[in-house]
């Protein structure tokens, strides 16, 4: 009896000491590594590629632990990130849009990355991307974030129905008209030549190609109601009868042949591919050019590093990881696996990339669009301003207002409420 | 007159016992109170004070603007549009829902075969997670491939309706979804109320030769009025706060095509987490609170005229 009790007690003691020791050992190992948390919104294939890149980096840098945390869609990521920053507890690095970046700058929470990344990478970034990541802080222009997953708008077209893609607005209208077919004579087309999704970036595309600017030179007045705006609206009204109009993504109707062409982000390539598989062939083309230019809006997010609640070691490790992510090798791997564009200037001329594009011709169009990228101005109230423009666009498309009235109303609201504050 | 020693002891004992009992009661209430306090009362009071400041959530500096936020909100045409849309939703969903629920509960109250199956079937939507159900309805409402349009075109030869993209049909789509989701709850409450009505009333009425409709109007409805009143208040309060379904159907926070499905809560969410105007958003929440409170007070005043308590 006594021996039994003694044995039991002895066993318990050994277990406790053993577990404690293990805990200490694990803690020591973990503590010796620098932990860099990276909050992102990449799902499925994109997430796998990001994990692969992080693992590759960690193999070469055994003292750094990259902890990837998937936070859902961009909206959820932004909300969670903002809450964490307000609580003084953000991750070390995260994906962020320009809107959100301005909020973090207000809290003084970001580490300006323009000075931190290696100069060879900095000189290899296209000017459009540098401008996109530059913000006004205390009267000076500072590059705060770095580009990461960027895409361009391209034209997707059904190769069974169309042999050569349109290259101008007029050709696009002609092709859309000829490809709109009502097979069963019930008054509603069963196949549309084009597809329209009523979101701001779609309208801004055409507005920009007609030579329009959202603001005047010093951002004191909104100029969406200029002639370019009317021209873009009128053109889209002409295109509307031959277009499927819906707020849902157009990759599905495109895949099952309901829509012959549509304009969308190059990041949707994999979705278009799986939707069209087994139905018809498809290809991509640069955007049809408008009266003034054939430019594409730059979409996607950047990466920022927080200096709030982080240690110097964590920030240095994050910068090292960013140097890796922006290296030629990593940017090419990212672009090839995900469909986002390779962001370094030297990527485009690299033989690995040119060979890849030769085998995957759909990747050619987004790269071509990179040469004519444009971005939104980084104005403080861009979210509201975009909403006003989107409302005006919807009103015109749904026939509730004529272009001049809708754009005038939007410009007036923007001038009164969102400018000069 | 001097107190007897026994009386003094007795009084002390009673006082001690009282505090012991009450103290125990408070102790039992403490956990619930802590949780309610942290997640309901404290944020409520805090939000009330935030509404008097301009704050963008990230800047620690808050600027005092008095009733400025309330003025801004009450001058915003989009706010009034959202109020109108909410009223549209409330009237469009609560009234048909209650009528339908009463009908179904009456049927379930008979000796119908498979009663418990139907009861479960009707209650199932209420316990289905709102987001999951809405995602299914997203496809049911699809213009070209959705189940609803399939039935409408094949059975009633109606033209294809673009439920999710036309401003005229967006809110009806939400109303339909709301009725589907919350009907079961009303049915169960009504059923409980119906079963609480004494059979003898009906028997007496039948002996006197009352028709079914007469029995319903003069026995069922009056005796059911406390239940009806409860369902009415709960449904109205709940439907004023409708949010999940609209947010999932149109994930761009815009509240549907041309904001036609933007209710007050969607407007609130957009102001708080889209524009980051926290003060304004708090003002919206407080205005909604006052609105619901006044409507509930009105209902309670009205109830004295039609609710019949035995």
Image: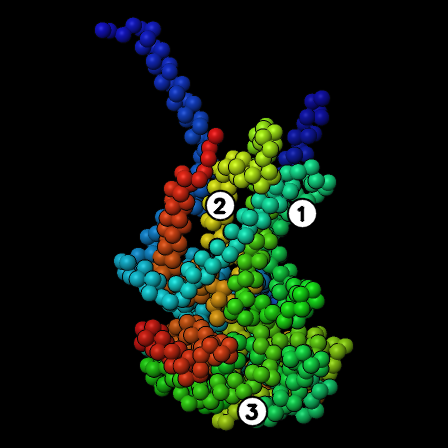
Q: Marks 2 and 1: in contact by CB < 8 Å?
A: no
Q: Quadrant of residue B81?
A: bottom left
**Residue B213 x/y as whole percent:** 58, 41
**Residue B184 x/y as whole percent:** 60, 47
Residue in front for this viewpoint, A286 or B254:
B254
Q: Nearer the viewer, mark 1 or mark 2?
A: 2
Have a look at marks 3 and 1 and say if they share a chain.
no
Which of the image's four quarters has the N terminus of chain A? top right
Residue A54 to residue A29: above or below:
below
Which of the image's four quarters has the C terminus of chain A? bottom left
Residue B264 to residue A95: above or below:
above
Q: Which of marks 1 and 2 is nearer the N terminus?
A: 1
Residue in front for this viewpoint, A5 or A334:
A334
Q: Residues within 10 Å of mark 1 (few under 14, many from 20)?
A: few
Residue in view at x 65 percent, y 90 percent: A178
According to the image, label 2 marks what residue? B232
Q: Marks 1 and 3: in contact by CB < 8 Å?
A: no
The dot on residue B121 is 1
Kindly report the distance in space between the C-alpha atoms of the residues bearing marks 1 and 2: 22 Å
């Amino acid at each position: 009896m006594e021996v039994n009790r003694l044995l039991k007690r002895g066993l318990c003691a050994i277990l406790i000491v053993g577990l404690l020791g293990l805990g200490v050992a694990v803690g020591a190992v973990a503590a010796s590594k620098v932990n860099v948390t990276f909050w992102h919104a990449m799902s499925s294939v994109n997430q796998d590629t990001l994990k692969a890149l992080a693992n590759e980096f960690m193999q070469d840098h055994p003292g750094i632990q990259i902890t990837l945390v998937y936070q859902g869609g961009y909206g959820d990521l932004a909300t969670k990130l903002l809450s964490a920053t307000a609580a003084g507890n953000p991750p070390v690095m995260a994906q962020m849009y320009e809107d959100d970046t301005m909020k973090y700058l207000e809290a003084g929470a970001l580490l300006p990355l323009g000075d931190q990344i290696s100069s060879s990478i900095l000189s290899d970034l296209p000017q459009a991307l540098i401008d996109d990541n530059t913000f006004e802080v205390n009267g000076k222009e500072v590059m705060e974030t770095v580009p990461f997953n960027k895409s361009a708008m391209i034209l997707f077209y059904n190769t069974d129905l169309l042999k050569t893609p349109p290259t101008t607005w007029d050709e696009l209208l002609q092709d859309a008209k000829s490809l709109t077919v009502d097979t069963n004579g019930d008054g509603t087309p069963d196949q549309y030549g084009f597809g329209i999704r009523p979101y701001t970036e779609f309208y801004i595309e055409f507005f920009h190609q007609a030579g329009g600017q959202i603001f005047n030179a010093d951002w004191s007045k909104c100029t969406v109601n200029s002639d370019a705006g009317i021209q873009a609206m009128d053109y889209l009204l002409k295109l509307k009868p031959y277009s499927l109009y819906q707020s849902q993504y157009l990759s599905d109707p495109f895949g099952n042949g309901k829509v012959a062409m549509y304009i969308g982000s190059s990041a949707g390539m994999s979705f278009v591919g799986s939707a069209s598989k087994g139905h018809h062939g498809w290809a991509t083309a640069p955007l049809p050019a408008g009266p003034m230019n054939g430019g594409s809006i730059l979409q996607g997010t950047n990466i920022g590093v927080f200096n709030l609640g982080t240690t110097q070691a964590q920030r240095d490790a994050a910068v090292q990881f960013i140097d890796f992510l922006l290296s030629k090798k990593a940017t090419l791997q990212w672009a090839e696996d995900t469909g986002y564009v390779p962001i370094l200037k030297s990527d485009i001329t690299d033989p690995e990339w040119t060979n890849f594009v030769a085998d995957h011709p759909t990747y050619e169009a987004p790269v071509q669009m990179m040469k004519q990228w444009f971005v939104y101005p980084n104005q403080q109230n861009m979210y509201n301003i975009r909403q006003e423009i989107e409302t005006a666009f919807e009103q015109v498309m749904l026939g509730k207002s004529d272009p001049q009235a809708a754009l005038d109303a939007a410009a007036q609201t923007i001038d009164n409420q969102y400018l000069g504050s | 007159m001097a107190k007897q020693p026994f009386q003094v002891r007795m009084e002390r004992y009673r006082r001690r016992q009282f505090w012991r009992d009450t103290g125990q009661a408070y102790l039992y209430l403490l956990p619930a109170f802590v949780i309610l306090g942290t997640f309901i009362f404290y944020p409520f009071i805090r939000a009330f004070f935030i509404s008097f400041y301009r704050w963008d959530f990230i800047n620690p500096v808050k600027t005092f603007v008095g009733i400025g936020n309330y003025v801004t909100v009450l001058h915003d045409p989009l706010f009034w549009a959202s109020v109108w849309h909410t009223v549209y939703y409330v009237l469009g969903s609560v009234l048909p829902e209650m009528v339908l629920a009463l009908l179904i509960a009456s049927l379930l109250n008979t000796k119908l075969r498979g009663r418990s199956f139907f009861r479960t079937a009707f209650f199932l939507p209420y316990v289905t997670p709102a987001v999951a159900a809405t995602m299914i309805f997203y496809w049911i409402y699809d213009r070209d491939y959705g189940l609803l349009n399939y039935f409408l075109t094949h059975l009633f030869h109606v033209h294809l309706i673009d439920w999710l993209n036309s401003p005229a049909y967006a809110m009806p789509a939400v109303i339909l979804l709301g009725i589907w989701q919350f009907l079961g709850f009303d049915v169960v409450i009504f059923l409980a109320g119906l079963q609480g009505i004494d059979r003898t009333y009906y028997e007496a009425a039948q002996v006197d030769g009352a028709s079914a409709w007469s029995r319903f109007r003069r026995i069922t409805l009056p005796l059911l009025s406390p239940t009806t009143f409860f369902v009415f208040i709960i449904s109205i309060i709940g439907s004023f706060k409708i949010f999940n379904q609209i947010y999932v159907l149109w994930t761009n926070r815009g509240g549907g095509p041309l904001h036609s499905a933007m209710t007050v809560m969607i407007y609130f969410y957009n102001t708080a987490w889209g524009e980051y105007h926290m003060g304004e958003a708090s003002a919206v929440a407080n205005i909604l609170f006052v609105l619901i409170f006044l409507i509930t007070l009105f209902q309670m005043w009205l109830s004295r005229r039609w609710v019949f308590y035995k």
